[in-house]
């Protein structure tokens, strides 16, 4: 219990530090940015902007005030779950982002399923047949998976499965079939490091005394591998997931653009192109929050799957 | 180094198939990058609307794009950009990160604790998102993307180098050199740098690949290189409406990215084996 | 001398393929029904390798030749499936590292059920009642141990649970590989008492692998001395102690005699001299 509390506390501190540093940095960057955001904004509408229009907009978005005042106001609003409103669509930022969240989470879940299947199968293959040809295949799958650009893989998949073979829908979201290609793309992009990590952990687990004891009890090979060895080796993968949540969010962004998937990533990319600052800032804040919360969940999950830590007997 | 030693080391390098393929690719890509300007059969920017969306032919090996530009020439020319920028970004990151890591680890104490606290704070934030933030604030283009990459990457090097320095510091030879009054600078140069160099090289090799993936991904989603720059990701972005008609527009730029990143990963893996990094660290 | 042989190891030889090194050679060893046989020697002498050859637990890069007859069948020649069955119902093994006796993140009870049901066709509840019975027989709080993870118990308790587990399969031979080395003296003695007890009750044989001569004197019917991969001497405990022929045994014994002698050994000595 004490351990749990200290984990929660340290993650909260991390959240505070990260959010304040990042929001401040983005604020300063916005201020020193060479392109004037207000002018950009006026240009979007393709009208000739007058000096008066500019002043009016500046007042409206409080760009005329000192940066610390602006920052302070923003932070105060954040505490009330108010992230301001979009310059372009005039909708509240928090609403815009939250409405996109389910699509992103759905895609991520699909990707995780593919990731799980890929890493279990190739990681196990590599460990069980260490040094033989299945291990060689596992190694090259990981190597190629780490080298292929995810958006290109997505393009190839669309080309073959949607355009040539007409099996799956190209873009958008709706039916289960829409999930298949984006999930595969995301899963493949994430899998390589998990495959390698699982392989290594499984190799060392298979040499551990408790596996020897299980073999001495005459348990079947499959039982030992899947119920005893694999379970122990999956634990570090959970930690890995916490660490790689950032690149996961990045990977999802690219795939959402590729498949026109209406998630958070698609929103942020169009906001960056339109330089819709409140949305960008809100997005960074929410992603930071998601990263820390995911890591908190991972920490707690780790306690559950590894009962030894709860006892204070941490094993390496 | 003696010639015999060099020869045996070279043999050891080539003996590993990973390394052989990696080196072969590196030579090929390096050659293309450096000689790019002289190799291109056509002007990569020359628009020719009469000759657009052609398939593979003797004159246009990889066909032409939607504006009639020669895809082969654009890919060759783009190598300089994609590979050059990847290597450049990592070089800058190494040049900033390694000294800070050395300094922080060598000085230790409060300075170290303070620096690392900052580093941890930023590191826990995904680099992709930071790059998006910077692109969003400074505007989406190649320069800002490189700035974002360097901003995140130097930290990784500082962190790793610091860790290595702390480990090496415990060892006797560093202690000895401290006692013998040789300056800290000399200790770092003579003892620490040769120890940490292999790790840095391996990391940098793999990182160049990662950065190239990041640059091309950003260019593909329109936040990196902007048209008509023949960056490979940007080429895929520009041609994406025409893939169904001319698949070669999709195949070759992607293949170029993949081979380049593969080369980096193979070299990284091969060098890791060559330097025996895991064994050395026990 | 051997009443009726249960297991007979003949000309066992193990070489490591990678280093082309002979690890053990010319090992001949026989265990009769109901006998407790000691296999002593210092660490690295090849005792554990011998046991692992019987269990076929050696790493794949080690080559084994020779014959190991268990109830007339050559353990080394049968197919893996038959051998696996043999392990469950014929030969049980208790290891030195009690932390590795059970998989750490599965409750002991579940592992017992899993093992019992691998070898005997029965329902989960039947297996559970067997598990609880054997845990009880080992002097453990059966319910609590059944619901525990191995790291929640003491070393002695884990080893007793491990014995209970092999007991549940009604084995004919239990191999104890340095079973008490990692335990404190009191729990070690207690575990050994339980081994004696089940031997008397079920009539199974025991191969006691140890580097502890005193333990072997006190607990075994007959013993083998192993040194550098070979068996150098064989005999009754008194023979080994007082009438040894091999210089290595002599060295071993002189080491022991330098220690304060145990009561039981003093008794035996008075009798045999």
Image (cartoon, coloured by chain):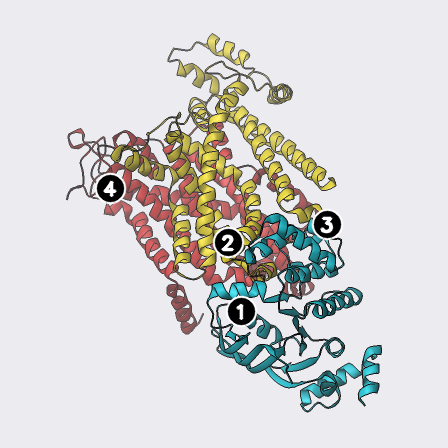
Chain colours: A yellow, B red, C cyan
Task: Confirm whether circles 2 and 1 share one chain.
Answer: no
Whether residues under marks 4 and 2 lie with C-beta atoms below 8 angstroms apart, the answer is no
- Closer to the camera in the image, A235 or B276: A235
Query: Which residue matches tag 3?
Result: C143
Instruction: Looking at the image, tell me whether mark 3 or mark 1 is earlier in sequence order.
Output: 1
| Other residues around mark 2 within 10 Å, as few (<14) / some (14–19) / many (≥20) | some
Instruction: Looking at the image, tell me whether mark 4 or mark 2 is earlier in sequence order.
Output: 4
**In the image, residue A293 lies at what x, y percent?**
60, 33
Whether residues under marks 3 and 2 lie with C-beta atoms below 8 angstroms apart, the answer is no
Report how far apart the C-alphas of labels 3 and 2 lie in the structure: 55 Å
Disc 3 chain ID: C
Report how far apart the C-alphas of labels 3 and 4 lie in the structure: 76 Å
- Closer to the camera in the image, C273 or A84: C273
Q: Secondary structure at mark 4?
A: helix
Task: Please tell me whether residue A264 is drawn above or below residue A39 in the rendered image.
Answer: below
B195 on left or right of B242? right
**In the image, residue B273 lies at what x, y percent?**
46, 61
Query: Which residue matches tag 2?
Result: B200
């Amino acid at each position: 219990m004490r351990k749990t509390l200290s984990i929660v506390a340290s993650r909260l501190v991390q959240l505070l530090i990260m959010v304040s540093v990042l929001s401040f940095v983005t604020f300063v960057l916005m201020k020193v940015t060479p392109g004037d955001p207000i002018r950009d904004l006026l240009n979007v509408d393709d009208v000739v902007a007058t000096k008066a229009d500019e002043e009016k907009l500046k007042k409206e978005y409080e760009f005329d005030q000192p940066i610390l005042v602006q920052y302070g106001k923003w932070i105060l609003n954040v505490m009330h779950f108010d992230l301001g409103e979009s310059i372009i669509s005039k909708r509240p930022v928090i609403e815009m982002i939250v409405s996109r969240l389910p699509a992103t989470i759905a895609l991520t879940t699909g990707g995780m399923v593919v990731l799980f299947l890929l890493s279990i199968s190739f990681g196990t293959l590599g460990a069980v047949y260490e040094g033989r040809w299945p291990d060689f295949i596992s190694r090259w799958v990981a190597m190629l998976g780490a080298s292929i650009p995810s958006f290109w893989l997505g393009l190839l998949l669309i080309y073959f499965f949607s355009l040539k073979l007409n099996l799956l829908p190209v873009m958008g979201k709706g039916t289960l079939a829409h999930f298949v290609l984006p999930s595969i793309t995301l899963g493949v992009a994430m899998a390589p490091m998990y495959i390698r990590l699982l392989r290594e952990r499984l190799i060392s687990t298979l040499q551990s005394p408790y596996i020897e004891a299980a073999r001495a009890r005459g348990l079947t090979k499959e039982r030992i591998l899947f119920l005893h060895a694999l379970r122990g080796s999956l634990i570090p993968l959970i930690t890995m997931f916490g660490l790689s949540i950032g690149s996961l969010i990045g990977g999802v962004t690219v795939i959402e653009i590729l498949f026109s998937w209406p998630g958070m990533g698609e929103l942020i990319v169009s906001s960056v192109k339109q330089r819709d600052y409140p949305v960008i800032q809100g997005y960074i804040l929410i992603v930071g929050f998601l990263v820390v919360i995911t890591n908190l969940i991972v920490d707690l999950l780790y306690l559950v799957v590894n009962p030894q830590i709860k006892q204070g007997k941490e094993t390496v | 180094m003696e010639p015999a030693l060099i020869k045996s080391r070279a043999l050891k390098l080539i003996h590993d198939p990973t390394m052989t393929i990696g080196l072969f690719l590196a030579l090929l890509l390096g050659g293309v990058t450096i000689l790019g300007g002289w190799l291109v059969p056509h002007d990569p920017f020359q628009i020719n609307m009469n000759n657009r969306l052609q398939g593979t032919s003797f004159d246009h090996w990889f066909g032409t794009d939607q504006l009639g530009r020669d895809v082969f020439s654009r890919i060759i020319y783009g190598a300089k950009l994609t590979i050059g920028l990847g290597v450049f970004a990592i070089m800058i990151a190494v040049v900033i990160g390694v000294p800070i890591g050395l300094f922080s680890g060598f000085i230790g104490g409060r300075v170290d604790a303070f620096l690392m606290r900052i580093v941890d704070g930023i590191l826990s934030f995904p680099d992709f998102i930071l790059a998006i933030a910077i692109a969003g604030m400074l505007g989406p283009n190649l320069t800002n993307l490189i700035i974002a990459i360097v901003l995140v990457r130097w930290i990784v090097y500082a962190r790793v180098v610091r860790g290595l320095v702390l480990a090496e510091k415990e060892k006797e030879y560093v202690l000895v050199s401290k006692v013998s009054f040789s300056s800290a600078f000399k200790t770092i140069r003579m003892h620490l740098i040769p120890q940490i160099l292999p790790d840095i090289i391996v990391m940098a090799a793999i990182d160049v690949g990662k950065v190239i993936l990041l640059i091309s991904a950003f260019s593909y989603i329109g936040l990196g290189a902007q048209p008509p720059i023949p960056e490979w990701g940007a080429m895929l972005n520009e041609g994406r409406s025409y893939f169904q008609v001319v698949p070669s527009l999709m195949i070759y730029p992607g293949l170029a990215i993949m081979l380049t990143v593969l080369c980096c990963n193979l070299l990284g893996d091969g060098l890791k084996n060559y330097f025996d990094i895991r064994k050395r660290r026990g | 001398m051997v009443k009726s042989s249960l297991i007979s190891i003949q000309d066992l030889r193990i070489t490591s393929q990678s280093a082309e090194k002979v690890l053990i050679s010319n090992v001949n060893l026989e265990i009769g029904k109901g006998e407790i046989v000691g296999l002593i020697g210092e660490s690295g002498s090849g005792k554990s390798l011998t046991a692992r050859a019987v269990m076929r637990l050696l790493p794949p890069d080690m080559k084994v030749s020779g014959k190991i007859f268990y109830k007339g069948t050559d353990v080394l020649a049968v197919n893996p499936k038959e051998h696996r069955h043999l392990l469950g119902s014929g030969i049980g093994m208790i290891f030195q590292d009690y932390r590795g006796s059970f998989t750490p993140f599965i409750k002991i009870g579940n592992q017992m059920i899993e093992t019992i049901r691998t070898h005997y066709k029965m329902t989960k509840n039947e297996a559970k009642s067997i598990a609880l019975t054997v845990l009880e027989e080992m002097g453990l709080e059966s319910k609590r141990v059944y619901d525990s993870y191995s790291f929640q118990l003491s070393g002695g308790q884990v080893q007793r649970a491990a014995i209970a587990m092999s007991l549940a399969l009604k084995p004919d031979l239990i191999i104890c590989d340095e079973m008490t080395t990692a335990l404190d003296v009191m729990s070690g003695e207690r575990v050994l008492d339980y081994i004696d007890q089940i031997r008397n009750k079920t009539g199974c044989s025991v191969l006691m692998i140890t580097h502890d001569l005193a333990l072997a004197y006190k607990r075994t019917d007959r013993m083998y001395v192993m040194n550098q991969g070979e068996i150098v001497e064989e005999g009754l405990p008194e023979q080994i102690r007082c009438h040894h022929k091999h210089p290595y045994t002599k060295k071993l014994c002189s080491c022991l005699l330098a220690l304060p002698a145990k009561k039981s050994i003093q008794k035996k000595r008075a009798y045999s001299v």
